[in-house]
Image (cartoon, rainbow, N blue to C red):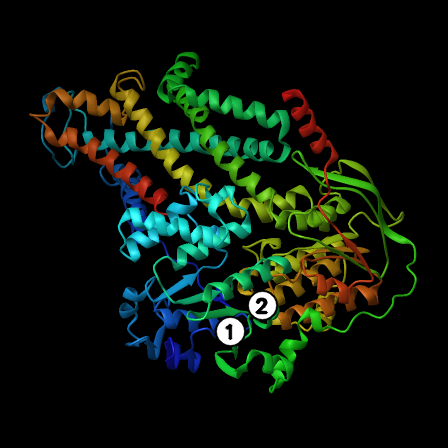
Amino acid sequence: MSLLQADDITVRDGTTTLLAPVSLRLDPGEPLVVLGETGSGKSLLAQALMGTLPLGLEAKGQVTIGAQVLNSGAPDQFRGLWGREISVLPQEPWLSLDPLMRAQAQIAEGHCLVRGLPPREARIRAASDLSELGLADAAARYPHELSGGMAQRVAIAAARAGGARIVIADEPTKGLDAARRDEVANLLLNEMGQSGGLLIITHDLALAERIGGQLIVLRAGEVVERGATRAVFAAPGQSYTRDLLAANPENWTGKAAAAPAGTAVISSRNLSLARGRRTLFRDVSLDIAAGQVFGVTGPSGCGKSSLGDTLLGVIPPLQGQVQRQPGLHPFAFQKLYQDPVAAFPPRRTIGETLMDVVKMTRSDPRDVDRLLDGLGLQPDLLARRPGAVSGGELQRLSLLRVLLRRPAFIFADEPTSRLDPITQARVIKLLTNATESDGIALMLVSHDQALIRNTADAVLPLTPPCDPARAAAKKRVAIALQ
Amino acid sequence: MSVLDLSAAPQPPLSATRRVGVVLIALVAALSLLGPLIVQGDPYAQSLMKALAGPDAAAPLGYDHLGRSVFHRLAYALRLSPVIALAAVMTAGAAGLALGTLSAAKGGWIDRCLVMLADALLALPGLLLILMVLAMVPGTALGFWAGLSLVLWVEFFRLTRAATRETLASPAVQASRLLGFGAAYVFRVHIWPEIAPMMLTAAAFGTATAIMAIAALGFVHVGMRAPTPELGLMMVELLPYWREAPLALLAPVLATFALLLGLTLLAGSRKT
């Protein structure tokens, strides 16, 4: 007996079909992964299964949950199942906790109001949920006092408190680094156990591989391939799946050994940086030569981006120096942003913004056409505003804008972390090709170690320093107390 | 999700409430500008024989206690207050915009001093400040302009400063600066489009506040002096005769109400 069975789920927006008929079943103890790029319809599928489609979208098909048969075209029927049969783990769960409520109370609320236990019993159940997850001492803490991983476990416990056996997780690892991603995957698998159901919607190949179970690959609203995750990863049957797997940074072919680096375009000596009273890093010395790809990797919050901003002169260093190669024009040092939408003036078309750069630098307007062609971009994108262009295209357009300035150094700050794998592979390829052919020094910052390993000529792993000043201060307090 | 083509979307038309606001303001403006052209008359001419008389061909809204045409007095009053208010709002807007941008861009002690000055002015009741300026500056209209400007610039300053600070910290501005664009470009492309809609809203509210202040001070006999036709002054002059000449009293009240409501509707219904 399957926990959930969906037959011929279709989603339409007026006359356009967003999701072609998809059927799936969810069995106890066997997770189901729906894998796809942005815009593949994978979130629509999840919303159709839960009856939470946005207004204006129309779903068809039959969903069987336990003994109940529901019509996904009538979302009102689903409401009674939320929390009791199906629970949803929201994206970035640490943002979905109530910041003014203690951890245990958030879970007890689900036991009390959804499952219908008396308040006293709900509190006891919440406490036992927390201790099962190893969070017994966090019961009285507020969300801001929890670490990211703890907050995520609390969110999972709260989502499950209503007694639902089926958990639907939509991009549960969005914005997480590799270690945290594995932690979340293990947690979800543990929660599922032998009798629960788990449906994971993701574009993250590593997560899909880690979860295992069954796999459905979606593209543009259609099922491309389905089967056991392990079998599909080992031998993809369709060319699209092969492209998708090849786009995983883990599977990129490593970079050939680089020629010995020439003179440094930009270098730093004994650079230290602090934010507030916290030291981000100390004594960083580096040299980045023309044509070289210099990778920087490390956990979030370790100062990767700040290091780049310091090299660009946007943030003053605490100690140490940054040296630029003499003879370069002052604007030869450029930056690519993590969120390209935020890096363009929002109310101007991209063409206008690019023409501003052409006019200021007095370069040839035909450069824009040449670069558009080289980066594989359609000229009609120039008539649009930044919000109306897809992330991958906009990141290439930012690269175009930067190249118009004829840079000697580009600092790329997580340029592909918001893109799906195939687009990411394409953008990184274009970026490294452009910098190599023009002899531009590239500093590539990413939390993805595989990406850096397979792209960079030299790697700087940044780790949070053990702060001697702070340790000493603590010691002083301890001595004073004695 | 599919890419939304925002550039193809046409500019949204004025919302219904805003349109009502525009119509109300246009009606009041038509009354004050075109009225005296259609029915000629003198707002100062007295004729005690006609005191508190009802409407006739020469005075469509009747006569006040001194036998002056209420219609013509109202038309001139509706020119005086809005002109002073608009002049004050423009001065205050320009000053607030300049100082707010300066404060956000420079930071440091310039920012601190300007914020302290603005806070100090906010701590004083606006009408009291206008009264003090009126006492110092010769000429009532000039005094109102100076006093209202002094009260109103704080709002523009605070709005500009807050929005500009946020915009200047954005990656878009950082990218423009790294590319080598100067302060003028940053202001034109990044800051102005961000604050322009807010400034227009604040200007409409500011105009309403200013008209109200002039009328309120006129009503308590400390603003414009008789026999100048002014909204507040007309109301208080006609108040004792409300039983004999209700239309004469209602006319300035309704006109003021329509003007203030129109400005508030125009300002307040911005959806973003």
* Badge number at residue A207: 2
Q: Quadrant of the N terminus of chain A?
A: bottom left
Say whether disc 1 or disc 2 marks the residue closer to the N-terminus.
Answer: 1
Q: Residues within 10 Å of mark 1 (few under 14, many from 20)?
A: many
- Residue under the point 51% across and 21% down: B117
- The image shows residue A219 at horizontal and vertical percentages of 53, 78
Disc 1 to disc 2, C-alpha distance: 9 Å
Front-lying residue, B44 or A413: A413
Q: Residues within 10 Å of mark 2 (few under 14, many from 20)?
A: many
For badge 2, the amino acid type reads: Leu
In the image, A36: left or right of A298? left
- Residue under the point 40% across and 58% down: A159
- The image shows residue A433 at horizontal and vertical percentages of 78, 69
Can residue A370 be seen?
Answer: yes
- SS for callout 1: strand
- The image shows residue B40 at horizontal and vertical percentages of 24, 35
Q: Are marks 1 and 2 in contact (CB under 8 Å)?
A: yes
In the image, A307: left or right of B15? right
In the image, B51: left or right of A103? left
Can residue B44 be seen?
Answer: no
Q: In which quarter of the image is the C terminus of chain A?
A: top right
- The answer to whether residue B89 is above or below residue A111 is above
Query: From this viewpoint, which residue is outermost toward the bottom?
Result: A237
Residue, disc 1: A33
For badge 1, the amino acid type reads: Val
- SS for callout 2: helix
In the image, B264: left or right of A378? left
Q: Residues at marks 1 and 2, common chain?
A: yes
- The answer to whether residue A157 is above or below residue A199 is above
- Residue under the point 49% across and 69% down: A200
